[in-house]
Amino acid sequence: MNQLEISESTNKENELLDAAFLQKIEKLSLISKRLFSGQMKGERRSTKRGSSVEFADYRDYSMGDDFRRVDWNVYARLEKLFLKLFVEEEDLHVYILIDCSKSMGFGNPSKLLYAKRLAAALSYIGLCNFDRVGLAALAGNKCSVHPPKRGKQSAFEMFDYLSSLKADNETKLGSSLHDFSLRTRQPGLVILISDFFDESYQTGINALVSRKFDVVLFHLLSREEENPSIVGDLLLIDSETSVRREITITQTLLRKYQQRLAGFCKDIETYSLRYGCSYIHLTSESPFENLILNYLRRRGALR
């Protein structure tokens, strides 16, 4: 049987999501605000019986189902009826883009680990709904693309790819997103997870919007970045550029920092909404299960 077998040992290896959580989210679906070719507005794509040739998954036989879709080889082995499911050739393409700049390695847990867990959950939800899901790591001026897959039998291949990602060097969001937009022919839902510590993000968002992608921005910061607890005389070193700066941190300076940070976040939200993108702000300490099962559903990103 080709159904995905979820084991505790496999999930411990990828260190992203456990089996119990995957079972909780497999009935959810990603929501796209934009209508793409092959979709019915406001609906998820349904499986196609008979004319498609691409196998997607199995499900239990129910009274009234077409016996021509029964896999009799499986029945011979298991003495149980299972239906083959096939998918439309035109479907929702979902692209999950992760900022792998060195600043994403900050935090406890790190922003990158949280981003990988978020990407794993969203990709699994898409795969369970027969969406075509691709991943891309943004690093330097380029993006490294993991080819789109569909059907949840591809989930652990994607988890392995996510587990391999490292926070390294400096990422130019404008250039790397432009690179992605040029290399991706089929428009769809783009989910970008980043701390946006690069002023060129506007150029990157413009590149995506101009190619008719439906863009969702996850602005991910650590709690220490939002509410720093450090005070006194310090030597600060930029993790990406290695620029050093001696500074004396006082409570007055911390208040000014938080005001600037609030303005920074507001600017990204305003810019994204101006171009029809969705903006979701969160920290790497946000309770993960509540984020997926409750918060993103209230925000209209999932249902």
Image (cartoon, rainbow, N blue to C red):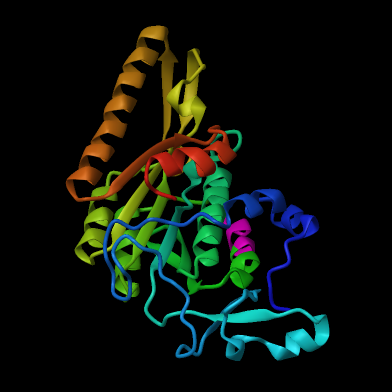
Relative to residue 113, is residue 257 depicted above or below?
above
Residue at image point 62% right, 59% down: 164
Part of the protein shown in magenta: 159-165
Percent position of residue 144, x then y: 46, 66
Q: Quadrant of residue 22?
A: bottom right
Total number of numbered labels? 0
> Hey, which residue is sitting farthest left in the picture?
274
Residue at image point 45% right, 90% down: 51
Percent position of residue 212, x then y: 23, 65
**Quarter of the figure with the N terminus:** bottom right
Is residue 81 a member of the stretch shown in magenta? no
Relative to residue 35, is residue 20 depicted above or below?
above
In terms of depth relative to the viewer, which is nearer, 204 or 22? Answer: 22
Residue at image point 60% right, 37% down: 109
Q: Main secondary structure of the magenta part?
A: helix
Relative to residue 286, is residue 48 depicted above or below?
below
Q: Is residue 163 left or right of residue 52?
A: right
In terms of depth relative to the viewer, which is nearer, 182 or 150? Answer: 150
Percent position of residue 293, x then y: 53, 43
Relative to residue 91, is residue 120 depicted above or below?
above
Residue at image point 48% right, 73% down: 148
Report whether residue 113 is seen.
yes
Q: Is residue 227 left or right of residue 285?
A: left
Report whether residue 241 is seen.
no
Percent position of residue 11, x then y: 72, 55
In terms of depth relative to the viewer, which is nearer, 178 or 115? Answer: 115
In terms of depth relative to the viewer, which is nearer, 184 or 93? Answer: 93
> Hey, which residue is sitting farthest top in the picture?
251
